[in-house]
Image (spheres, coloured by chain):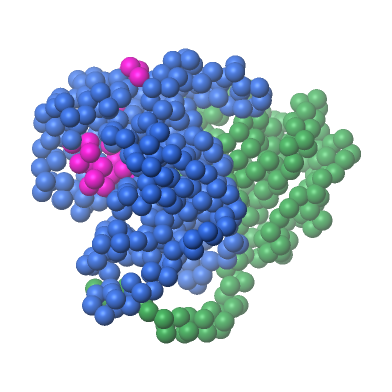
Chain colours: A green, B blue
């Protein structure tokens, strides 16, 4: 995983609540085992015409969408299917953070494991961000994970919550698996105790 | 489907899988939830997962269901009330007399759709219904080990009077068959109720969310879905493809013919369900009615394979998601129970199954 460093970026606004992972990437694109190219499938059914050509007015097909590394979405982003292809496609497109008022649990977990920062902001700041980007599509904000601070285009700032361990992993660019493997002796000790309790699975 | 059938899913277990409908296994008093690919790798490599504690959310369902109303209607009602983010950060515990009276298969239908309300997991305390279902399945413990397991499992249920972070109460006796009209599973209504009007909503984002959904589904507001034409009826998916679901559908389809304008697909959830249905003659009921009797699988729930709606087509589906394009690009899905799906298959339009019960 890459280290997550402070950055400034434009915003790509998508003011729709409950954007599900079937919209982020439809199931027909899940047969791949490579992440490469998934960015082209991001929001596929919203982004392309029936003949496969890009809809010229859809934000992610326009230069200002391409220039944004932060997606600003409606409430309950990432609900539905557990597919990790959703954060993969967002990252492959070029996003490094998503801002919403809430995230679905599985998506949030998947995003954190792929250096995609899910940022929860209060409703008033959320509305202010949509207003700011509508007033000036080139408005930039700064994402500072270390201090958990979002600096808004109007000069104000807002702190955001993040699980301490997930933050550590993103800041250091290490994954959870590496961390757990270091704890192998403790895990083995726990497992050896557990075998004393009953194993209810019959041997077939 | 297969974990429970084999007796692999047992009370007190932690069950994870790279599928959000892993929550199904919660019906056995297991903590079961979906994970992403990275976490699957993690589990395969270490048998461990790092988790933070979820909030607890009691969903108490008391009372007796009316004829024509079932487990699917309970869970669609729950989701319509608390919304698809209502359970975010929580694990549901389904409790109450209506839940206790359900079979294991019906309990699985309810736990299956916990994720549609935003909860990663939903579980039901194990009881005699659970133990009767598990006894003698291939991977269930036998003999002395079974007795030991029972002693252990009986300690699992939540204490009386336990406090939950959140609670909701549903009166089962007041429920009607439910159906969804929109593009997320929370957009559900009793089948006789009118589709809501976006203009009656004050919040601009909520108004636009509903308006966008109705534009996609191409539905007017203010009238019920009853009588709306459908092109496909899909009876299947991990929500509703167990033997009791197929029996319920067959009960309606028996001696009747499906509407010639509707493609009706009946897809068992596993090979064992398929064989059992065939042993009971359900396949003949479906075929004689004019429905397709298919091989076990996900079929039109997810549109990853050849089974897809064409753009603009409508389906009544017993699956779990009605998101835009979920059953095929441009397809439009009404989620409902196997009974409602079977009734709709016969008429070719959205139908209240209660008008058909006991008349064939």
Q: How many marks?
A: 0
The correct choice, above or below, for B81 with respect to A85 in the image is above
Front in this rendered view, residue A54 or A18: A18
Residue A175 located within the stretch drawn in magenta: no
Residue at 54%, 29% (x, y): give it: A46
Q: Quick check: A120 above or below B163?
A: above
The part of the image, by quadrant, that contains residue B262 is: top left
Magenta residue span: B226-250
Q: Nearer the viewer, residue A110 or B208?
A: B208
Q: Residue at x 66, y 30 (%)?
A: A15
Where residue A190 appears, x then y in whole percent?
52, 81
- Res. A85 visible in picture: no
Residue A160 screen position, x and y as percent: 76, 50
* Residue sitting nearer the eye, B309 or A80: A80
* Relative height, residue A180 to residue B238 (above, below): below
Across and down, in percent, residue A39 comes to 57, 41
A105 with respect to A32 (left or right):
right
**Residue sitting at 57 percent across and 36 percent down?**
A18
Image coordinates of residue A95 in percent, x first then y, are 66, 44
Q: Residue at x 68, y 64 (%)?
A: A165
Residue A177 visible in the snapshot: yes
Which residue ends up furthest to the right in the rendered image? A155
- Compared to residue A12, the image places residue A7 above or below, namely below
Residue B25 falls in which quadrant of the image?
Answer: bottom left
Quadrant of the snapshot with the C terminus of chain B:
top left
């Amino acid at each position: 995983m890459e280290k997550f460093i402070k950055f400034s970026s434009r915003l790509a606004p998508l003011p729709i609540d409950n954007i599900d992972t079937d919209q982020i990437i439809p199931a027909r694109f899940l047969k791949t085992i490579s992440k490469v190219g998934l960015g082209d499938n991001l929001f596929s059914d919203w982004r392309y015409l029936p003949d496969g050509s890009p809809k010229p007015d859809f934000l992610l097909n326009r230069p200002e969408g391409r220039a944004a590394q932060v997606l600003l979405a409606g409430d309950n982003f990432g609900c539905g299917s557990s597919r990790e292809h959703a954060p993969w496609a967002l990252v492959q497109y070029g996003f490094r953070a998503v801002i919403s008022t809430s995230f679905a649990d599985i998506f949030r977990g998947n995003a954190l494991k792929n250096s995609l920062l899910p940022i929860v902001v209060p409703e008033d700041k959320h509305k202010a961000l949509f207003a700011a980007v509508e007033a000036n599509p080139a408005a930039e904000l700064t994402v500072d994970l270390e201090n958990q601070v979002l600096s808004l285009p109007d000069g104000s700032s807002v702190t955001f919550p993040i699980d301490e361990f997930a933050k550590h992993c993103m800041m250091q660019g290490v994954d959870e698996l590496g961390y757990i493997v270091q704890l192998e002796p403790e895990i083995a000790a726990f497992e050896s105790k557990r075998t004393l309790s009953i194993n209810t699975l019959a041997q077939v | 489907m297969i974990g429970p059938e084999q007796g692999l899913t047992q009370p007190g277990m932690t069950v994870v899988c790279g599928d959000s409908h892993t929550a199904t296994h919660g019906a056995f008093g297991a903590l079961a939830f979906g994970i992403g690919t990275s976490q699957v790798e993690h589990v395969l490599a270490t048998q461990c997962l790092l988790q933070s504690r979820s909030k607890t959310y009691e969903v108490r369902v008391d009372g007796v269901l009316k004829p024509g109303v079932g487990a699917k209607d309970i869970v669609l009602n729950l989701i319509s009330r608390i919304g698809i983010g209502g359970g975010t950060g929580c694990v549901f515990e389904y409790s109450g007399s209506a839940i206790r009276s359900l079979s294991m298969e019906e309990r699985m239908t309810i736990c299956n759709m916990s994720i549609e309300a935003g909860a990663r997991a939903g579980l039901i305390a194990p009881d005699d219904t659970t133990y009767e279902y598990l006894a003698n399945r291939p991977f269930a413990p036998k003999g002395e080990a079974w007795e030991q397991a029972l002693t252990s499992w009986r300690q699992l249920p939540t204490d009386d009077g336990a406090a939950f972070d959140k609670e909701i109460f549903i009166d089962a006796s007041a429920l009607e068959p439910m159906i969804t009209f929109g593009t997320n599973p929370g957009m559900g209504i009793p089948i006789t109720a009118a589709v809501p009007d976006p203009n009656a909503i004050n919040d601009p984002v909520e108004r636009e969310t509903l308006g966008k959904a109705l534009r996609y589904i191409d539905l007017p507001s203010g009238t019920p879905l009853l009588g709306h034409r459908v092109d496909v009826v899909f009876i299947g998916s991990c929500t509703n493809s167990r033997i009791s679901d197929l029996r319920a559908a067959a009960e309606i389809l028996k001696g009747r013919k499906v509407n010639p304008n509707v493609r009706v697909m009946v897809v068992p959830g596993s090979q064992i369900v398929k064989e059992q249905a065939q042993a009971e003659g359900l396949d003949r009921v479906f075929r004689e009615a004019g429905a397709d009797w298919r091989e076990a699988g996900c079929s039109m729930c997810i549109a990853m394979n050849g089974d897809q709606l064409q753009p603009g087509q409508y389906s009544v589906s017993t699956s779990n998601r009605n998101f835009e394009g979920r059953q095929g690009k441009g397809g439009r899905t009404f989620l409902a129970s196997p009974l409602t799906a079977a009734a709709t298959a016969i008429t070719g339009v959205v139908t209240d199954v209660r008008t058909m019960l006991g008349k064939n």
